[in-house]
C-alpha cells in the first residue's frame, strides 16, 4: 500500500489548518475585547473545532508510521472590522473548499483519510455558508443591527 499522497495531503492540512485556526483564535480575542462577545466566542470555538481536525489528520499520519512535521510560518494580519473580516474569510473559505474538492480523488486509495477529508470538507462548506449568511443578513438588516446581534 502506498500512502505517499495521503501523508502529503495530511501534512499540508495539518500545517495550513493550524495556521488558519490560530488566526480565528486571535480574531476571537480581538472581537471579544471590542465587546462583540458572541462573535468573539464563535471564533474561539471555531479554533477548538478546527484543531480537532488537525488532531485527526496528525493521528492518521502517526497511525501510518509517519511523524508529522511542525511548520508554522505563515504571517497574517488581523482584521479589526468584523464585516471586512467575514468578507476576507469567505474568500479564503471558497479557495479552501475548492482545493479540498480537487484533493479528494488523490485520496481514493486510502478510504480512512478519504472519509476524514469528506467529513472535513462538509464542515468547511458549513463555514462557507455561515459567512455567506452573515453577509446576506448584513445586507438585509444593516451593519448596526447585525452588530447588535454579535454583542
Ligand atoms: Fe476556518
Ligand atoms: Fe472551518
Image (cartoon, helix red, strand yellow):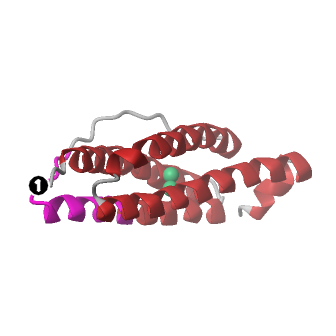
Is residue 29 visible to us here? no
Q: Which of the pair 77/16 is nearer the observer?
A: 16
What is the x, y in percent for residue 14? Answer: 30, 51
Identify the magenta region: 52-70
How would you classify the magenta stretch by its main secondary structure? helix
Relative height, residue 15 to residue 122 (above, below): above
How many tags in the picture?
1
Q: Is residue 63 magenta?
A: yes
In what element is the residue under mark 1? Answer: loop
Quarter holding the N terminus is bottom left
Percent position of residue 91, x then y: 60, 37
Horizontal side of 110 relative to 126 (left or right) equals: left
Left or right for 88, reference 109: right
Q: Quadrant of residue 145?
A: bottom right
Residue visible at 42% across and 60% down in the picture: 50
Would residue 4 be seen by someone viewing this image from the given angle?
Answer: yes
Across and down, in percent, residue 62 comes to 15, 62
Q: Is residue 104 magenta?
A: no
* 94 relative position to 141: left or right: left
Residue under the image location 25 percent in, 50 percent down: 6
Residue 105 x/y as whole percent: 40, 46
What residue do we see at 45% from left, 60% from top? 118
Q: Nearer the viewer, residue 123 or 46?
A: 123
- Residue at coordinates 70% horizontally, 43% vertically from top-left? 83
Toward which corner of the image does residue 90 lie, by quadrant?
Answer: top right
* Disc 1 residue lies near ligand 2 with CB under 8 A: no
- Binning the other alpha carbons within 10 Å of mark 1 as few (below 14), some (14 to 19) or many (20 upward) gives few
What residue would you read off at disc 1? 66
Quarter holding the C terminus is: bottom right
Amino acid at each position: 500500500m502506498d500512502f505517499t499522497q495521503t501523508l502529503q495531503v495530511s501534512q499540508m492540512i495539518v500545517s495550513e489548518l493550524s495556521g488558519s485556526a490560530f488566526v480565528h483564535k486571535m480574531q476571537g480575542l480581538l472581537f471579544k475585547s471590542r465587546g462583540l462577545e458572541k462573535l468573539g466566542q464563535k471564533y474561539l470555538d471555531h479554533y477548538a473545532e478546527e484543531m480537532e481536525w488537525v488532531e485527526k489528520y496528525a493521528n492518521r499520519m502517526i497511525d501510518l508510521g509517519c511523524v508529522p512535521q511542525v511548520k508554522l510560518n505563515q504571517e497574517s494580519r488581523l482584521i479589526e472590522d468584523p464585516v471586512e473580516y467575514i468578507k476576507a474569510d469567505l474568500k479564503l473559505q471558497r479557495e479552501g473548499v475548492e482545493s479540498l474538492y480537487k484533493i479528494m480523488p488523490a485520496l481514493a486509495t486510502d478510504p480512512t483519510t478519504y472519509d476524514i477529508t469528506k467529513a472535513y470538507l462538509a464542515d468547511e462548506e458549513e463555514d462557507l455558508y455561515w459567512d455567506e449568511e452573515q453577509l446576506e443578513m448584513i445586507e438585509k438588516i444593516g451593519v448596526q443591527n447585525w452588530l447588535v446581534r454579535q454583542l
